[in-house]
C-alpha cells in the first residue's frame, strides 16, 4: 500500500509543469521530474547523477553557488533567478523556490521557466530604450549609435549597419556602419545594397553566409558557409524605409528567439529613424534657405557668434562680407521669378566656390548674402576674396536660354578693427556695401540679349 502511494505521488510529481530537483550536498542531481525535458531539453536520465552546475549558464555559476550556500545554511528562498543552457544551446531563464532538508541532506528546488516573461521584459525595455533614443538623440548618427548599443545589450552581434532610403532621391545609403572594434567598413556596399533592396521589396528578413557582404574579397568562397549576416527590413507606416544589417560573431547563428526580438526592435527602429529623419528635415528647414540650401539668417547669426567667440579666444582676425546683387529686380521683372531663382542658386554655388570649406556663406533673404571668413591676416585677405567674388559673378551664365552676367556690391568688416560684436560688424559691412553702391557708377543690369 505504501509503495502504491509512493508511485502515485511520483506520477503526480511528473505531471507538474515546473521542474522539481533533489540535489545532494555536493551539488549532484539525485532526482528530477519529467518537466525538466520540456524546460531544459534533457531527459531525467541525462541530468541525474551530473553536477547541477553543468547546466547553468557560465556567467551565472558564481552567483548560483553563493545562493546554494545560503539555502543549505537553512535560509529558504523564493524568487531567485538565474540562467541555464538548453540542450539546443539557447538560454533558459529560471525562477527558483528552494529550501534545505537537514534530515535528508537534500536541497529541494522547484524551477519555473520564466523565459517568456523575460522576453516580454526585453521587448518592453527595447521599446522604451529605442523610443527614448529617438526623442533624445540630437541627430541620426547619434541615434544609430544608441540603437547599436541597445541591440548589443540584448543580442550578441559583431557589427551593425543601417541602410536608409533617401526620401527625395530614392537612393539607398549606408549612413551607419560599425563593428565591435569601431571599424567603419563593415559591409561591401554594392553587395549589401542588392540584398537590402531584395529584403525591402519582400518585407522578409534574410540570412546570408559570411562571404555575402564582407567588404574584402566578397566573392571569395568562405570556409564557413554558415549564416553570419541577418538583414531585417525597416518598415514604417507599411512602407520599407531601409534595412538593418547585423553581423554575427564567427560561427554564431541568431536563435529564433533572438530573431523574434530583433524583428520587434527593427519595427521600433524604423519608427525612430522616421522620426529622426523628420526631425532632421525640420531642423534643416529651420536653419537653411530652401531655395539655395545655404544657411539662413538664424543659422548665420549662430555661426557669426561662434566665429567671434573663437576669434576672441585665439586673438585672431575674422572678416564679414555683406553682398548685395546689383539690379537683381531687373531679372525678376524681365525673365520672371523662376529665372531669378535659378540665378540665385547659381550665385550661391559661385560664392561657395570662392571661399574655403571652413568659411560660411549664408543668404539673409532676397538677393542679400553674407560671408564669414575666419583666421584672416588682415583687410587685404578679405578684399582679395571680395574681388574673387566679383570676378566669379561677372562670368556669363545661361539662365532660361539667356546669357546673364552679374555685378555685386560688397561691404567688408574686420574683427576687431571694425567692431567687436556681431551687431557692430554687420552694421559696418552693411554700410560699406551701400557706400560702394552709391560711390560707383550704377552697374548695368544683367545682360539680356
Image: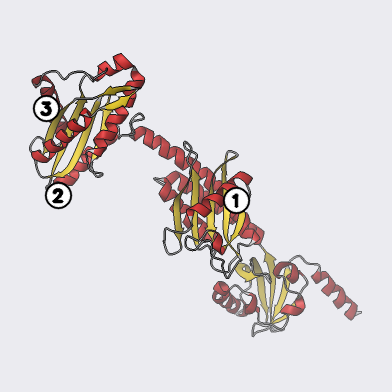
Give the mark nearest the N terminus, 2 or 3. 2
Q: Nearer the viewer, residue 383 or 64?
A: 383
Label 3 – label 1 distance at C-alpha = 61 Å
Q: How far from the left and from the top, in percent, is residue 203? A: 62, 46
> Which residue was labeled with disc 2?
314
* Image quadrant occupied by the N terminus: bottom right
Residue where numbered disc 3 is placed:
432
Residue 264: which disc?
A: 1
Work out whether 96 lies above or below 389: below
Residue 182 in the image: state x and y as whole percent. 41, 61
Q: Residue 129 location in percent, x, y?
A: 50, 51
Say if residue 52 shows up in the picture: yes
| Element under disc 2 | helix
Q: Where does residue 348 sit, x and y in percent of width and height? A: 28, 32
With 11 as the anchor, is 281 left or right in this view?
left
> Residue at point 61% right, 69% down?
83
Q: Are marks 2 and 3 in contact (CB under 8 Å)?
A: no
Residue in the picture at 9% in, 38% down: 379
Q: Quadrant of residue 424?
A: top left
Query: Is residue 181 shown above or below 289?
Result: below
Dot 3, crowdedness within 10 Å: few (<14), some or many (≥20)?
many
Q: Earlier in the sequence, mark 2 or mark 1?
A: 1
Q: Secondary structure at mark 3?
A: helix
- Examine the rendering and report whether any part of residue 118 can be seen: no
Amino acid at each position: 500500500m505504501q509503495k502504491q502511494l509512493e508511485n502515485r505521488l511520483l506520477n503526480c510529481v511528473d505531471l507538474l509543469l515546473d521542474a522539481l530537483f533533489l540535489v545532494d550536498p555536493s551539488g549532484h542531481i539525485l532526482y528530477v521530474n519529467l518537466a525538466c525535458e520540456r524546460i531544459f531539453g534533457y531527459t531525467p536520465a541525462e541530468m541525474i547523477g551530473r553536477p547541477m552546475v553543468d547546466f547553468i549558464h557560465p556567467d551565472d555559476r558564481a552567483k548560483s553557488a553563493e545562493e546554494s550556500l545560503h539555502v543549505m545554511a537553512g535560509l529558504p528562498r523564493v524568487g531567485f533567478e538565474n540562467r541555464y543552457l538548453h540542450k539546443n544551446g539557447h538560454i533558459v531563464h529560471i525562477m527558483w523556490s528552494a529550501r534545505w532538508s537537514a534530515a535528508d541532506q537534500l536541497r529541494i528546488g522547484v524551477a519555473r521557466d520564466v523565459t517568456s516573461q523575460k522576453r516580454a521584459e526585453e521587448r518592453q525595455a527595447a521599446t522604451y530604450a529605442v523610443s527614448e533614443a529617438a526623442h533624445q538623440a540630437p541627430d541620426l548618427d547619434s541615434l544609430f549609435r544608441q540603437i547599436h548599443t541597445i541591440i548589443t545589450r540584448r543580442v550578441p552581434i559583431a557589427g551593425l549597419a543601417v541602410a536608409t532610403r533617401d526620401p527625395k532621391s530614392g537612393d539607398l545609403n549606408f549612413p551607419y556602419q560599425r563593428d565591435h572594434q569601431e571599424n567603419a567598413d563593415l559591409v561591401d556596399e554594392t553587395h549589401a545594397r542588392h540584398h537590402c533592396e531584395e529584403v525591402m521589396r519582400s518585407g522578409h528578413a534574410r540570412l546570408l553566409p559570411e562571404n555575402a557582404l564582407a567588404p574584402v574579397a566578397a566573392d571569395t568562397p568562405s570556409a564557413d558557409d554558415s549564416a553570419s549576416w541577418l538583414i531585417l527590413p525597416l518598415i514604417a507606416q507599411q512602407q520599407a524605409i531601409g534595412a538593418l544589417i547585423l553581423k554575427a560573431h564567427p560561427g554564431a547563428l541568431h536563435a529564433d528567439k533572438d530573431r523574434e526580438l530583433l524583428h520587434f526592435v527593427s519595427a521600433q527602429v524604423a519608427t525612430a529613424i522616421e522620426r529622426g529623419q523628420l526631425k532632421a528635415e525640420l531642423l534643416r528647414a529651420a536653419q537653411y534657405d530652401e531655395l539655395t540650401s545655404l544657411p539662413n539668417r538664424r543659422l548665420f547669426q549662430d555661426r557669426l557668434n561662434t566665429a567671434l567667440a573663437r576669434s576672441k579666444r585665439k586673438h585672431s582676425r575674422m572678416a564679414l562680407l555683406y553682398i548685395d546683387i546689383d539690379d537683381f529686380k531687373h531679372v525678376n521683372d524681365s525673365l520672371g521669378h523662376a529665372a531669378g531663382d535659378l540665378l540665385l542658386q547659381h550665385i550661391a554655388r559661385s560664392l561657395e566656390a570662392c571661399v574655403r570649406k571652413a568659411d560660411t556663406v549664408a543668404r539673409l533673404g532676397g538677393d542679400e548674402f553674407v560671408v564669414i571668413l575666419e583666421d584672416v591676416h588682415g583687410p587685404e585677405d578679405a578684399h582679395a576674396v571680395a574681388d574673387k567674388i566679383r570676378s566669379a559673378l561677372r562670368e556669363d551664365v545661361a539662365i532660361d536660354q539667356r546669357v546673364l552676367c552679374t555685378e555685386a556690391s560688397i561691404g567688408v568688416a574686420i574683427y576687431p578693427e571694425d567692431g567687436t560684436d556681431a551687431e557692430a560688424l554687420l552694421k559696418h559691412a552693411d554700410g560699406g556695401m551701400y557706400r560702394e553702391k552709391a560711390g560707383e557708377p550704377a552697374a548695368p543690369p544683367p545682360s539680356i540679349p
